[in-house]
Amino acid sequence: MPRPAPYLLRWSSARQCYEFCEGRDQIVIDLEVESTAWFVWVEKVSSFAFHGRMGSYTARQEQKERGGGYWYAYIREQGMVTKRYLGRSANLTLSRLEQAAQLLTKHQKDALMLGKSMQKLSVAHTISSTSTPIAIEGESNISNWLQQEPLLATKVQPPRLRPATIQRAHLVNQLQQGMEGACILISAPAGFGKTTLLSTWLAASNTPAAWLSLEPEDNEPVRFLSYVIAALQTLDPSIGTSALALLRTPQPAPFETVLVLLTNDLVSHATAGFALILDDYHVITAEPIHSAFTYLVDHLPSRMHLVIATRSDPALPLARLRARGQLTEVRIGELRFAQEEAEAFMHTVMQLDLSSQDVAVLQNRTEGWIAGLQFAALSLRGKSDIRELHSSLPG
């Protein structure tokens, strides 16, 4: 850690007020916190110590290449430094400083609990070194996660949008309006354009988003949450650092503890509004993961929105969200291609010169199923008589 800060802002129990001190002798100086002089002062200095009612830490201002300086709270615990975002100088109010102290103090307690669990684990391994391993409550594939596997970067990147894509403005607007609530659910079978719609929406709206493409291997809870944090860190590398550290210990902390730390990080995230997008959520079948996400939904920060694309409805409290008006749903009926969209798809994307009548027949036979229209278009290539295809298409 850098040298101790030369200034100290502390809560005086005797005087029932905050005091501002300078130097090793902690000489009290006349500077009223949250006054104009205070905000001018914090803009000019690089650090100060804070000893509040909720806890203590060192506040430091870091200069970024773009956007000027940002303040962070630092605390050292068990040889590890934890960092908490505070904001710009104008955000350094007493309530903000105390909130950071409370979050860091909570993290300290969680770390101590984890340390005790790891001590028990060490003793258990010592006792059982010549016998069969002792099962410890809460253990989750410890041996697998002692050897950390690298995370695949492409899983946390939105898919590349195809050059020729049908613009579905009404659905894009529906998703954008859904950002006023907590959750957006896009539920339909394969081939209805769920992923393409999400990619189009992100490109059109410039919405800050953390993307995660799921696969069956992600049903391991520690792996799943590690990827969720990796996705969120594409928005801000400081999100979830404490939670990730707890996940990567030989004895992972209880999921509830990890989720508390992650939620607290998300609450302090600076972005005005952002989305966490989980694509192909239907592959997740592990009950602990559903329980973890139910917890996250129940404690979702106001600036965060959860977007789920799936082939079947997830085991989440959808009815509760629906009753509260916090759920936007896009289903098969909205995702089907209408006649005009089917024509644009055949002409622009598949580059087939078909009459409106022929497209209408295909649209009717496929019921607007995008993948079905694509299969039909591929079958049309090289055929001289479209009626031959019409007769061979199943209903």
Image (spheres, rainbow, N blue to C red):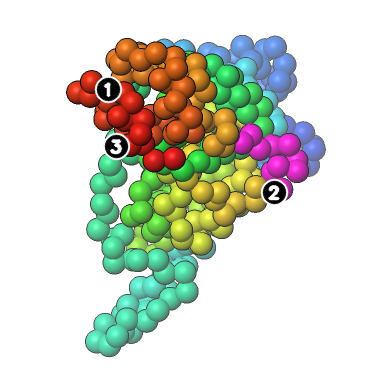
Residue 153 badge: 3
Q: Are marks 3 and 2 in contact (CB under 8 Å)?
A: no
The residue positioned 46% from the left and 22% from the top of the image is: 360
Q: Residue furthest bottom?
A: 131
Nearer the observer, 382 or 25: 382
Query: What x and y, as percent, mark residue 270?
Result: 55, 26
Q: Residue 362 vs residue 128: left or right?
A: right
Camera-near label (3 vs 1) is 1
The residue positioned 71% from the left and 48% from the top of the image is: 320
Location of mark 2 (residue): 319
Question: Please, is residue 226 above or below residue 31 in the view?
Answer: below
Question: Please, is residue 323 above or below residue 274 in the view?
Answer: below
Location of mark 1 (residue): 385
Q: Residue furthest left?
A: 382
Nearer the observer, 109 or 35: 109
Q: Amino acid at mark 1?
A: Asp
Q: Amino acid at mark 3?
A: Ala
Number of other residues with Cα within 10 Å of mark 3, as a class: few under 14, some 14 to 19, many 20 or more: few
Residue span colored magenta: 319-330
The local secondary structure at tag 3 comes to helix
Number of other residues with Cα within 10 Å of mark 2, as a class: few under 14, some 14 to 19, many 20 or more: few
Residue 211 seen from this side: no
Q: Give the CA distance from mark 3 to mark 2.
A: 34 Å
Q: Amino acid at mark 2?
A: Ala
Query: What x and y, as percent, mark residue 167?
Result: 46, 16
**First in residue order: circle 2 vs circle 1:** 2
Number of other residues with Cα within 10 Å of mark 1, as a class: few under 14, some 14 to 19, many 20 or more: few
Q: Give the CA distance from mark 2 to mark 1.
A: 50 Å
